[in-house]
Amino acid sequence: MPSVVGLLEQHELAARRRVDGLREEADRIQTELATAELEWQEWAIARRRVDTVLAPDDGATAEAEVTADPRDAEVQSTLRDAAKPKSQVPVWRPGLAWSVLSVDYPRILTALADRARLGQGPLTCQEMAAAFGMDVVPARVEALRSKAKRLVARGWLAEQPPGRFTLAAGGSGPGDGS
């Protein structure tokens, strides 16, 4: 007859394996979600570019005809108001939405917001590359580091200790206007 401690250890091991399996599944789903959101953002950008190209000569766009979702109109007005021309990363201020950032930046912010929500610590650029499903090679890591440093310089992220990034104290998520 097995001991009580032995039975408890077996149950604990089974529970630990289940938790590990669920964590792997959650990571996979989170990666798929980030990829789907990135694809959606790319298509939205493509639609806006086509709209700009097809706009009348005065440069105005037919936003009311093209934008079916009122949130899209809100994002476009925020884009016009928040980002200066040729600025990929505007300086963060209260009420500024993540949608003003170009494609890769919200992905970084989302990963760090998820970590903060789960009570996990900061991320390195190597960890971000792995989480995004990228090859963890110097070129990819340095590209992420450049973007993360730009977000730090503009107040979106904090970097303490050096090389480890978290959300800046002011913003906590895309729905909070950060």
Image (spheres, helix red, strand yellow):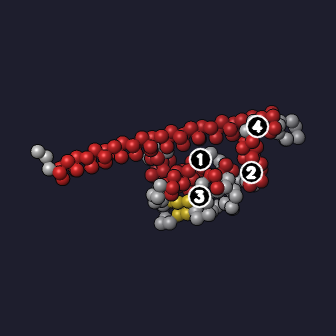
What separation in Å lies between label 2 and label 3 (alpha carbons)? 18 Å
Q: Measured along the vertical axis of the image, is residue 125 above or below residue 135?
A: below
* Contact, mark 3 vs mark 1 (Cβ under 8 Å): no
Mark 1 or mark 4: name the one nearer the start of the chain.
4
- Under tag 2, what secondary structure? helix
What separation in Å lies between label 1 and label 2 (alpha carbons)? 18 Å
Which residue is identified by label 4? 67
* Contact, mark 2 vs mark 3 (Cβ under 8 Å): no
Q: Residues within 10 Å of mark 1 (few under 14, many from 20)?
A: few
Q: Which mark is residue 78?
A: 2
| Image side of residue 169 versus residue 49, left or right | left
What residue type is disc 1 on?
A: Asp
Q: Nearer the viewer, residue 170 or 103?
A: 170
Instruction: Give the label, 3 or 1, closer to the camera.
Output: 3
Q: Nearer the viewer, residue 177 or 35?
A: 177
Q: Which mark is residue 104?
A: 1
User: In this orientation, does residue 152 appear?
Assistant: no
Q: Residue at x 54, y 43 (%)?
A: 34
The image position of residue 62, as x and y in percent, is 83, 37
Which residue is identified by label 3? 172
* Contact, mark 1 vs mark 2 (Cβ under 8 Å): no
Q: Residues within 10 Å of mark 3 (few under 14, many from 20)?
A: some
Instruction: Give the label, 2 or 3, closer to the camera.
Output: 3
User: In this orientation, does residue 102 appear?
Assistant: yes
Mark 4 or mark 2: name the one nearer the start of the chain.
4
What residue type is disc 2 on?
A: Thr
Mark 3 or mark 1: name the one nearer the start of the chain.
1
What separation in Å lies between label 4 and label 3 (alpha carbons)? 28 Å
